[in-house]
Amino acid sequence: MDKLDQFLTRAEGVLTRLESMLPPAVPQIDWYTARAFRWRKKQGSGYLQVVPRVIPINLRDLKNIDHQKMVIERNTWQFVRGKPANNVLLTGARGTGKSSLIKACLNAYSEQGLRLIEVDKDDLSDLGDIVSLISERIERFIVFCDDLSFEEGESGYKALKVALDGSIAGSSDNILIYATSNRRHLMPEYLRDNESYRHTEDGEIHPGEVIEEKNSLSERFGLWMSFYPFKQDDYLMIVEHWLKHFGIAENTFDLVRPEALMWALERGSRSGRVAFQFARDWAGKNCDAIQSSSFK
């Protein structure tokens, strides 16, 4: 019996090690209730991980980006209804609502079948696997790449170019790519790149291969939307919106504005993100005092 016990113990150890080397079991997905997913990798295998709670931001919460909001919402509306729509690249100043706008569109149209899959830049080479997994579904999927940028030679750059060239849109009409970036052309730009420009005899200037290559990826997105830093009044308007959201009365706003401006000055940015962070901080510190004074 001792030898048998030793054998069973060793066999159990071997099985445990083998199990750790096998790909993880693919989790079952309730496609009808799950609205958002993340593409995850484990031991070389990719799978969709359900996001149990999506940030509850609405389109009406996004201020001072009315044109961008109108264009992106219209494109998303077309996509959800099976009409022609474009892949989208949102670029510009940080904290101005690029990724929030995409999440707000998800919240607006999830009841109509819109779903979102967030993919990290390092996993863009798996786009083909993602397409195979969802191309036959009746839902409409936005593949979302947040804060996207590439360094020279990265593999995900070419994978995304191939996807935008038609391997996604051509193989299935229920998938679009929405990406955000602080870089207009998604690649670093150097002074030496200007050396590749060509001058013709009649004085025209033509970009060389280096510039053309760097522009080629962003040009594959059908829609480009630019976001710009907010002016002071725009920033304060967003602060007031979020203070209302947190239950702060309007008669306190005059007292809050100097603190909101100092908050932005310390962070070197007047963005929607900074406005939200200030409002959350101020409301958390002061709401109890305001409520208690109102009962006196």
Image (cartoon, grey):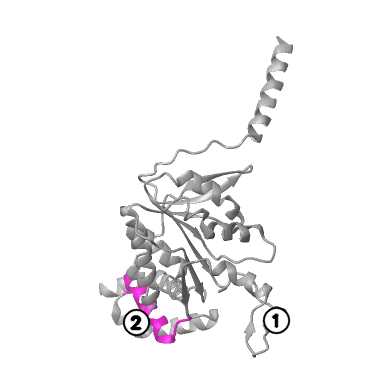
Residue 31, given in percent of the width and then of the height, sits at 39, 44
Q: Nearer the viewer, residue 67 or 85?
A: 85
Q: Is residue 103 magenta?
A: no
Lateral position of residue 195 relative to residue 130, left or right? right
Look at the numbered disc 1 and give the secondary structure of its residue. helix
Residue that badge 1 annotates: 191
How far apart are the alpha carbons under marks 2 and 1? 46 Å
Q: Nearer the viewer, residue 207 or 188?
A: 207
Do tag 2 and tag 1 residues touch (Cβ < 8 Å)?
no
Look at the numbered disc 2 and give the secondary structure of its residue. helix
Number of other residues with Cα within 10 Å of mark 2, as a class: few under 14, some 14 to 19, many 20 or more: some
Looking at the rendered image, the disc whose residue lies closer to the viewer, 2 or 1, is 1
* Image quadrant in which you'd find residue 185: bottom right
* Image quadrant in which you'd find residue 236: bottom left
The residue lying furthest to the front in this view is 201
Q: Which stretch is magenta?
A: 229-248
Residue 67, given in percent of the width and then of the height, sits at 37, 76
Residue 92 seen in the figure: yes
Task: Residue 253: give its label.
Answer: 2
Tell which circle, 2 or 1, labels the residue nearer the N-terminal end: 1
